[in-house]
Amino acid sequence: MGKDKKKKNKSMKFGTRILISFLAISTIPILMIIFINTMIEFFRMTPYGVKFSEISHMFPELYKWAVEFCVIAIAVLVITSFCINMWIYFGVSGPIGKLRKATKSIRDGNLDFSVDSNQGIQEMNDLFEDFEEMRKRLKESQEEKLNFDSENKELIRNISHDLKTPITAVKGYCEGIMDGVADTPEKMNKYIRTIYNKTNEMDRLINELTYYSKIDTNRMPYTFTKIDVKDYFNDCADELELELERENVRFNYTNELKDNALIIADAEQLRRAIHNIVNNSVKYMDKPERKIELRLKDAGDFVQIEIEDNGKGIAKKDQSRIFDRFYRTDASRNSTRGGSGIGLSIVRKILEDHGGKVWAGGEEGVGTIISFVLRKYQEVTYDE
């Protein structure tokens, strides 16, 4: 602290520097004239020379003109120096004052302002442009932090809601077993199966949260390999058919690819993306007969995969936003149905990391179509 104070005391204000420079420019010529006059009086110009005081009697007009010229020159020099110093002072002190006010606003946490970069001095203009760019970056960083905090709070709310529902159910069925309510093998089997399903829900939710944390910190491990599209999606379709059958959802799979194709992908992560899409579709189905269709299509250099359901559908205005984290719509992602709100954002992240793209379509009230594309693998050959 002591050293900092000493450094601060040694510094000089800009106005003080201007005053010192003005006094220096004004007084130095006067001192020089007095010094020259003293030297001339002290030394004689020739052995028979005359003193400088005698010149005024020998050449009165010349002496008068010389004196007037010196007075006018000094006056012009003083006035010019004063004007130039004031011009420099106000040209610099004004922008510095604005900059100091802006830094105080940033210090107080206020970033909702802007600074004008047109200050009349090029160096000041450059400084203000850099300052404005810094303010914008700080504001963006502040908004990102607020958004991140808001998303984390939303995630905690969603996770708490999703965990509370199955935990309450598990607790209720366990109490029923302990109280002897499940007094028949059928009831006991039903209670145990329900408990098993609810614990699976909690396990899935925890896994999704863990997976999300890895994606959010870019620590997701990928193992990319060449995958035969037909074989991979045939296996994937078989898995989905068994899972959806337990959910009483009719599943259909069609392969419209003209030729068999290869892709470079992580089989496990791609499967996770597909299952997330299907699970999201099942969650928001509202029709008595529920259906999901998986289609493979040829899109030139890409393979296009479509997953269509006959659920509630998504409004056109919401289709481009359903892959945002925690985004919900009244039509398709009602919060009363639970869900962490990160399933589709995980899908987008996985597919983007694969060099692909995902989007939503369909009609509200009719159903939803989630489509994504993956680039075909092509062998690079070199002509000898």
Image (tube, rainbow, N blue to C red):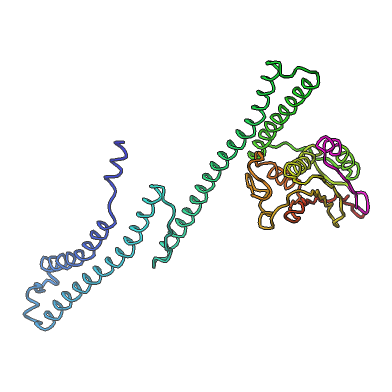
- Residue 102 in the image, given as x and y percentages of width and height: 38, 54
Looking at the image, which residue sits at the far bottom? 61
Rendered position, 73 above or below 4: below
On screen, residue 1 above or below 63: above
Say whether residue 247 is magenta.
Answer: yes
Q: Residue at x 29, y 44 (%)?
A: 8
In percent of width and height, residue 384 lies at 93, 54
Q: Is residue 47 above or below residue 222?
A: below
Is 98 left, or right, of 287 in this rendering?
A: left
Per the rendered image, the range of residues in magenta is 239-261
* Residue 341 part of the magenta segment: no
Q: Residue at x 77, y 46 (%)?
A: 287
Q: Position of residue 229 (x, y in %)?
A: 88, 45
Residue 228 or 137: which is nearer the viewer? 228
Q: Which residue occupies 68% across, 16% down?
A: 179
* In the image: residue 140, left or right of residue 280: left
Total labels: the figure holds: 0
Res 247 → quadrant: top right
Could you say which is closer to the camera, residue 362 or residue 376?
A: 362
Rendering coords of residue 111 (x, y %):
44, 52
Please identify the quadrant where the N terminus is shown.
top left
Q: Is residue 217 above or below residue 96?
A: above
